[in-house]
Image (cartoon, rainbow, N blue to C red):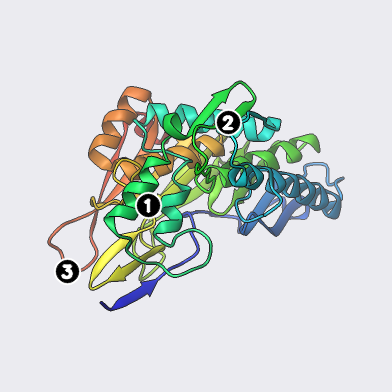
Amino acid sequence: MTASLKLHRRTFLAMTLALAACKNRAHLIEITGLSMGTTYNVVAIDHDGALDKPEVKKAIDVALADITAKLSNWDNRSEITQFNVASTGTPQVMSPELSRVMTAAAQVHQASEGRFDTTIGGLIELWGFGAPGSATVPNSDAIAQALETSGHQNALRLNGDQIAKRNAQAQVYLAGIGKGFGADHIAQVLESFGLTDYMVEIGGDLYTSGRNPDGLAWQIGIEAPNPADRTLAGVVGLSGMGLATSGDYRNYFEVDGQRFSHLIDPATGHPVTHATASATVLADNAMLADAWSTAMHVLGREKGLEIATAQNIAVQFIERRPGVEQPAFDTYVSPRFEALTA
């Protein structure tokens, strides 16, 4: 069996546009950095020109270090890692940050009919999409065993700010919601400095507030799901909302010509196989946009639009057009997405 490996760091697919021709560039704060295994970017307007940029950056980095210490699956000392390595079912009191994330994760899990699931860490590792390692197709017995220890109801017991394992092998994996929460946390830092017009992006998950330097809603580009280039499928104006895109075309591997996406369906234990190439969600905050974009992509366009309509979720699906040699795509949106972007 020959394998052609095409693994890329998971990147979401939105970018900020139109910062050129900025009338307030003298008061524009632009900050970049590294955190949570990826990059973050901040653009904010300091209308009075009184803020010290290094002080703002320091506050952001301190806040993100605190979030990493609670939510990172790559930090052996983090709160969630310590929970994962524990073999006991004794309830653990969560920090306020972890409690908020796990509560939201459980709500999205239920509303998405289980398609968003933070407990499939074992499956993610099994397919080689977790910690650095070799991607491989596991056997059916290994998949079945991993499925037995996943599923929120099967693996976890949540009670207020307490969390406990229902089985010793349960693993919580927060990559599908943690970066969105990080973006929201940066937004809180900016608001503590009195900033009201800003755009925050971390690992592709965004939160925007107010207006951009040209006095418009922040213009956010949604990338076309074509791995050969980075053209845009569209642009949305965003203010006071979060945005996240989940795509399957940069993080995958191939074995004997068959493509395996990093998006694992919690119901089957296998990567998704439908034609949906990306799902973009607009939500009240970046954390929910992050979680729902993953859920919607796993659901796929047909079932995803059904749930999005019932739950009033703003989602755009980009789907591969079958039977076409050159990449071609069709776009579908939920009623809420259409209303917000009209």
Residue at 54% x, 45% y is: 174
Label 1 – label 2 distance at C-alpha: 26 Å
Res 325 label: 3
Disc 1 target residue: 263
For marks 1 and 2 on the same chain, the one whose residue lies earlier in the sequence: 2
Q: Relative to 311, is 253 above or below?
A: below
The tag earlier along the polypeptide, 1 or 3, is: 1
Q: Amino acid at mark 3?
A: Glu
Spatial CA distance of label 3 from label 2 is 50 Å
Q: Percent from the top left, x then y, of residue 214? A: 61, 47
Q: Amino acid at mark 1?
A: Leu
The quadrant of the picture occupied by the N terminus is bottom left
Q: Residue at horizontal 39%, vertical 59%?
A: 127
Q: Residue at x 64, y 24 (%)?
A: 161
Given this view, does label 3 or label 2 mark the residue nearer the observer?
2
Task: Choose top left, top right, bottom left or bottom right for residue 321.
Answer: bottom left
Query: Disc 2 marks which amino acid?
Result: Ala
- Looking at the image, residue 27 sits to the left or right of residue 304; the answer is right
| Relative depth, front residue between 124 and 229 | 124
SS label for mark 3: loop
Q: Which element carries disc 1, helix, strand or loop?
A: loop
Residue 126 placement (x, y as % from top left): 41, 57
The residue identified by callout 2 is 164
**Picture mark count:** 3
